[in-house]
Amino acid sequence: MSSSSDANIITLLNNTTNQLNRYLAISIFLFGIIGNALNTLVLSQRALRLNPCSWLFLVSSIAYSISIISGLVPRFLSSWNADLTNTYPILCKLRIFIFFNSLTIAFWLIMLATIDRWLSSSINANHRQKSTLKNAQHCMICIMIVSTMIQIQQLVCFEANLTNAPIKCYTKTVACSILSDMTFALITVLIPLLLMFIFGLLIISNVRQTQARLRPVNMSVDSNEGHNSTTIGIGRQNQQKKRDRQLLKMLFVQILVILALTFPLALSKLYTTFTRNTYKSPLRNTIENFIFNLLLNLVNAASGMPFYIYTLTGGSIFRKALYDLVKSLREKMRW
């Protein structure tokens, strides 16, 4: 009776895993690609792309798109037994390298955006001066180079046609599993999230210090010309502060989403690594494979969320940029 029950559960979970990879993966793919494409178009407008934080959001959206394509297309094809990365070692290695590298770059760019918000919100003028587009671009290049150097080990560690792993394209030895899983858990997920959290607290501290230093100032202006210039200056400052607050809100929500959708997979990969040589029943293997595939889809979902986060939390600035984009596209279509 127990054996028959286990067989039924195994069949059910295998079918469910297949359906997840077939329908959930393609839904996340469309959801993510459309969102990141719109994100790229909106953030590439001149009004936003000159801001260092918006620039980092823009490049991270491109990196997210690459991770979605390399991560979800094979998941979808595997449900039809058409995933070539499961059988061809070169394709397996390249796909894994591109996926982990682009995902790592995207997460670290969001961390860099957190540092930029900390600099721009500081009461220290020297810190605020470091929040520039040029510095953001230099740091972005450094992150890409370092991430590529770290993730190059995936080309050696992964192999196709494996049977004792959650998926056929997986690490070939326990040592490779430990190296790959620790890299993902620490370098891709935990360290950038920890830094995001630390600098997030520092941003809150900066905001409180700024509010404490604010004092009402009585200004007397003799001429209408002076009054107008003062009003324009205050208006620009208020607009900049509003933009900074909305960028900060977009950033914090994105950090929480990344934490919720990626941290479970990091723990799952570490568990799989340290129990790889432990005897497991067929039912236990099936349950673990089902959980792994579900969490893998959730990680890809995190890559497709930024546009929808920005639309909901970006306030009037991001939504106005989106409206201007749609309006300009309509005008071009009329011509």
Image: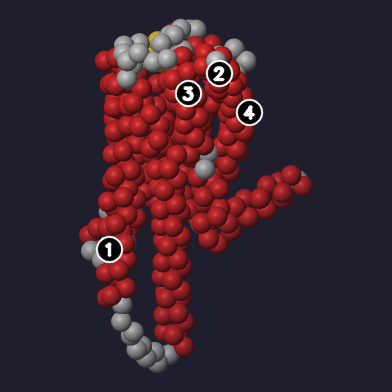
Q: Which mark is residue 34?
A: none
Q: Is residue 321 visible?
A: no
- Name the amino acid, label 4: Tyr
Q: Measuring 62% from the left and 50% from the top, which residue is drawn there?
A: 325
Query: Mark 3 or mark 2, which is nearer to you?
Result: 2
Q: Measuring 58% from the left and 58% from the top, which residue is drawn there?
A: 320
Residue to which mark 1 is pinned: 205
Vertical comparison of 122 with 309: above or below: below
Q: Measuring 28% from the left and 39% from the top, which residue is drawn there?
A: 191
Residue to which mark 4 is pinned: 23
Residue to which mark 2 is pinned: 5
In whole angstroms, how far apart are the C-alphas of marks 4 and 2? 27 Å
Vertical comparison of 305 with 284: above or below: below
Q: Measuring 43% from the left and 90% from the top, which residue is drawn there?
A: 223
Mark before the other along the chain sequence, 2 or 1: 2
Is disc 1 surrounded by few (<14), some (14 to 19) or many (20+) residues within 10 Å?
Answer: some
Mark before the other along the chain sequence, 3 or 2: 2
Mark before the other along the chain sequence, 4 or 3: 4
- Name the amino acid, label 2: Ser
In whole angstroms, how far apart are the C-alphas of marks 2 and 1? 57 Å
Q: Is residue 222 visible?
A: yes
